[in-house]
Image: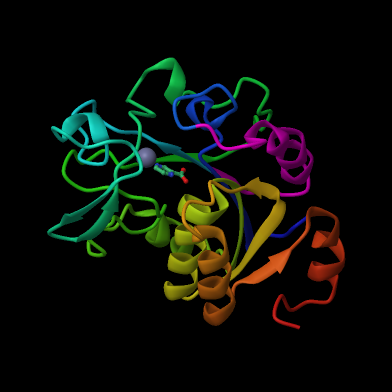
Amino acid sequence: MKDADDVLLVIDVQNDFMPGGALAVAHGDEVVPVINRLARGFSHVVLTQDWHPAAHISFAANHAGRSPFDMLTLPYGEQVLWPTHCVQDTPGAALHRDLDIAHARAVIRKGHHAGVDSYSAFLEADRKTPTGLGGYLREVGVKRVWCCGLATDYCVAWSALDARAAGFEVALIEDASRAIDLNGSLEAAWRHLHAAGVKRVQAADLHSTLEAGDMHD
Ligand code: VGL
Ligand code: ZN
């Protein structure tokens, strides 16, 4: 069992990111049993939900003449235009029904400002607006953040990078995550993660990694 210094951060395991969903991640459903098992080893689990208003700026449908996966320059930077997904309180925004983590303590909903996207569970895409997760984790004494979920190269990677920037030790559990991989995004994400000191681990490594006492060995 991981101790009070550790949190498992389960990112966006939502219906719209599953095969057949509005923004399907290939094999996204395969993370569910892996995460369920991992979560039993953590006393502290936090979940996130992508949680957009229908008028959200990241939706291609809200930009005349634009298509999903086009790029658009916005005041805060380059934005991928996505298919409409994870609209607040719709079935697509619900967590996968087989996700079985009764002891999860908190759910952070992100991307709720119509004019700003938020891949990261910590900081919105304007890179200024905090979600509050960093303050919450610090206040309860968390030192290490173990990230998993969907999608590896977007919300999981951005969350892991921001957790590092906030001063936590961070690992990304590769086989408890799946990627979108748009125009080389997965390779680029791993490059950034490595440079930032985010450890790349597999679910089976977790116990031995913790026993070693230092994620950066
Ligand atoms: C995500 C694209 C748009 C994710 C969310 O959860 O990785 N990707 N919104
Ligand atoms: Zn989104």
Circle count: 0
| Depicted 32 relative to depicted 130: above or below | above
* x then y, percent, for residue 47: 53, 41
| Percent x, y of residue 70 | 30, 46
Depicted 215 relative to depicted 95: above or below? below
Provide residue 199's location: percent of width, then percent of height: 66, 72
Q: Any magenta on residue 42?
A: yes
Q: Residue at x 42, y 52 (%)?
A: 121
**Residue located 33% across and 37% down the image:** 68
Q: Quadrant of residue 37?
A: top right
Instruction: Give x and y (percent) for residue 98.
Output: 68, 23
* Rendered position, 211 above or below 172: below
The quadrant of the rendered image in which ligand 1 is seen is: top left
The magenta-colored residue range is: 24-46
Nearer the observer, 58 or 166: 58
Q: Is residue 88 magenta?
A: no
Residue under the image location 85 percent in, 55 percent down: 204
Residue 8 vs residue 38: left or right? left
